[in-house]
Image: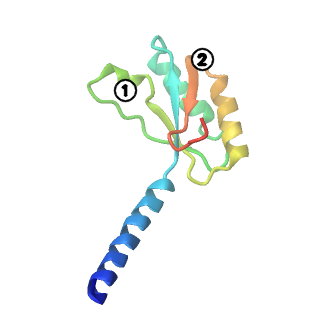
Amino acid sequence: MTLRHTLGLCAALVVLLTGCNASLNKREIVVHFTASATEAQHAAARTACATAAPHSSPEPIVHNSYATTRIDDIRFRVDKGNDHDLAQLYKCLAKQPGVIGVSDPLDMTR
């Protein structure tokens, strides 16, 4: 392998690793609701917990044509949240009518 190929491979590896690191910095908590939860309950949970913890913020509600997107349409960005922040957010969400749980897609310990 020539020096030129080695440098090109190293540059590609840096770009790949930088892209992976950037995607790992985007962390969100997904709130799961019962199938019978109303849109008002979804909105109320989002509003009630919007300021429950530092370093967390609700994301815009997005629906598509599939009814299943309404079950987990409330999400909170927690990019800079620590364990204490997450505990406060989870505690608030647990009190909300219609909420059956939360998930953290980047939490590999579960």
**Which residue is at a point 45% across and 20% down the rendered structure image?**
39
Residue 58, x across and y down, in percent: 52, 41
In the picture provided, is 19 more to the left or to the right than 66? Answer: right
Q: Which mark is residue 97?
A: 2
Residue 11 vertical placement versus 88 (above, below): below
State the residue lying farthest toward the top.
36
Q: Residue furthest bottom?
A: 3
Of residue 83 and residue 62, the one placed in the foreground of this image is: 83
Q: Is residue 63 above or below residue 17?
A: above
Q: Are marks 1 and 2 in contact (CB under 8 Å)?
A: no
Q: Is residue 6 above or below residue 65?
A: below
Query: Residue 72 placed where, x, y %?
Result: 45, 27
Question: What is the three-letter code of the residue carrying label 2?
Answer: Pro
**Dot 1 lies on which element?**
helix
Q: Nearer the viewer, residue 105 or 17?
A: 17
**Residue of label 1:** 69
Q: Residue at x 57, y 21 (%)?
A: 99
Amino acid type at circle 1 is Thr
Instruction: Provide the secondary structure element on which disc 2 rests.
Output: loop
**In the foreground, 92 or 110:** 110
Q: What colour scheme governs how the chains and residues are painted in the rendered image of this protein?
A: rainbow
Residue 57, numbered circle? none
CA gap between label 1 and label 2 equals 18 Å
- For the residue carrying disc 1, how many other residues have a C-alpha within 10 Å: few (<14), some (14-19), or many (20+)? few
Which mark is first along the chain, 2 or 1?
Answer: 1
The vertical placement of 4 against 19, above or below, is below
Residue at horizontal 59 percent and vertical 35 percent from the top: 110
- Foreground disc of the pair 1, 2: 1
- Depth check: give the residue in front, 15 or 88: 15
